[in-house]
Amino acid sequence: MSEYQGRLYKAIIFLNEENAVGGRVSVYAKDLLAAKEILENKYGVGTVFDLHNEDDANAVR
């Protein structure tokens, strides 16, 4: 059996570069904070991004 990779989180990254377009990325993480840490390690602390898990976003509130 395969090892647990975590939940799928999707994000749109907004880079601080002139004329930059937001890029879409996906990461597997155990929770939202871990996904945020992965993105901050890759793109830098302070990078603006919209991060969500589709199951959580579609859940009834």
Image: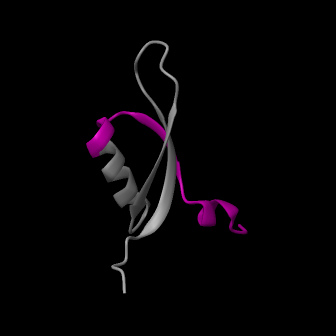
Taking the spot 34% from the left edge, 34% from the top edge, the residue there is: 46
Is residue 41 rendered to the left or right of residue 4?
Answer: left
Residue range in magenta is: 41-61
- Rendered view: 61 above or below 51: below
- Rendered view: 51 above or below 56: above
Taking the spot 38% from the left edge, 69% from the top edge, the residue there is: 30
Residue 25: x %, y % from top left: 47, 45
Residue 51: x %, y % from top left: 50, 48
Q: How is the image coloured?
A: one colour
Count of numbered circles on the image: 0
Is residue 56 rendered to the left or right of residue 13?
Answer: right
Taking the spot 43% from the left edge, 60% from the top edge, the residue there is: 32
Q: Quadrant of the C terminus?
A: bottom right
Is residue 58 rendered to the left or right of residue 7?
Answer: right
Kindly give the residue lying farthest to the top in the view shown.
18
| Membership of 45 in magenta stretch | yes
Which of the 4 image quadrants contains residue 40? top left
Say which of 47 and 12 sits in front. Answer: 12
